[in-house]
Image (tube, grey):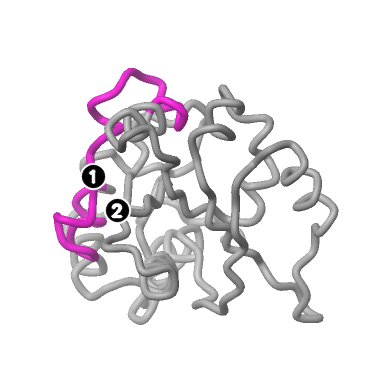
Amino acid sequence: MKCYFFGTFNPIHLGHVEIAKRVKEYYGFDSVIFVPSFMPPHKVEDLASYEHRLNMARLALGCENVSDLEFKLRVPSYTYRAIEYLYSNNGSKRVNFIIGYDQFFKLESWKEPLIMRDKTHFIVIPRKFLNGQVMGEKAFEYLKNKGYSFQVFNTDFLDVSSSMIRYYVSHNQDIAGLTTKEVKEYIEKYGLYNKLAGKKPVS
């Protein structure tokens, strides 16, 4: 049984890798497959090319754990299109889908949310605030009552973001320990994110 992790991965970092590892172990998935977005429908700042983001994901995870599915589908890269494809090729079983807390609560604003609701089982990764509590219990209850299938996976993970890495690179700061050695070397080799001085990281 597989689980899928969608995102821009701009770039992939150790937080992504750790989440996938823990989800795989806890739920007993055979694998967690990363699916970098090809052409996101909404503007994404400082977005490296699809080829670069795909290559970095493969370096961090191994080619067998990264899919170029969105490249093969129609653009823009609405997630529901990938879900429909995976669902139809999975015996019409719900697609296991790792999603961040904040994006989960925006699901009803996504393109074709009913397809996402009916064909997906979400593994929600919550963000913990200063008091250690996860906010948004009412929103969880609301989505449950609307028919969304999900589980909340409470786990601590490395406090790092892709925007943090981009910021550090643009300011000539070391990113060791934030992403893998191979990805760090790839970013340096191709000069990615080094023209972004002045941008601040998003927490």
Q: Nearer the viewer, residue 78 or 33?
A: 33
- Residue at the image point whose x is 29% and y is 39% from the top: 49
| Residue 26 vertical placement versus 124 (above, below) | below
Most distant residue in the top direction = 74
* Residue 74 is inside the magenta segment: yes
Q: CA distance from mark 1 to mark 2?
A: 7 Å
Please report the bounds of the magenta region as a residue range.
54-81
Q: How many marks?
A: 2
- Residue at the image point whose x is 27% and y is 32% from the top: 89
- Residue at the image point whose x is 25% and y is 60% from the top: 187
Q: Which of the labelled discs sits on residue 25, or is there none?
A: none
| Residue 32 vertical placement versus 87 (above, below) | below
Q: Are marks 1 and 2 in contact (CB under 8 Å)?
A: yes
Q: Amino acid at mark 1?
A: Ser
Most distant residue in the right direction = 138
Q: Position of residue 12 (x, y in %)?
A: 35, 59
Q: Amino acid at mark 2?
A: Ile
* Quarter of the figure with residue 36: top left
Describe residue 90's horizontal placement relative to residue 140 as left or right.
left
Q: Helix or strand or loop: what does disc 1 sit on?
A: loop
Please state, as top left, top right, bottom left or bottom right, where the N terminus lies in the image. Answer: bottom left
* Quarter of the figure with residue 136: bottom right
Residue for badge 2: 33
Q: Position of residue 167 (x, y in %)?
A: 48, 62
Structural crowding at the residue carrying mark 1, measured as other residues with C-alpha within 10 Å and reported as few (<14), some (14–19) or many (≥20): some
* Residue 104 is inside the magenta segment: no
| Residue 108 vertical placement versus 186 (above, below) | above
Q: Nearer the viewer, residue 37 or 190?
A: 37
Residue for badge 1: 67
Q: Nearer the viewer, residue 60 or 26?
A: 26
Q: Position of residue 134 (x, y in %)?
A: 75, 69
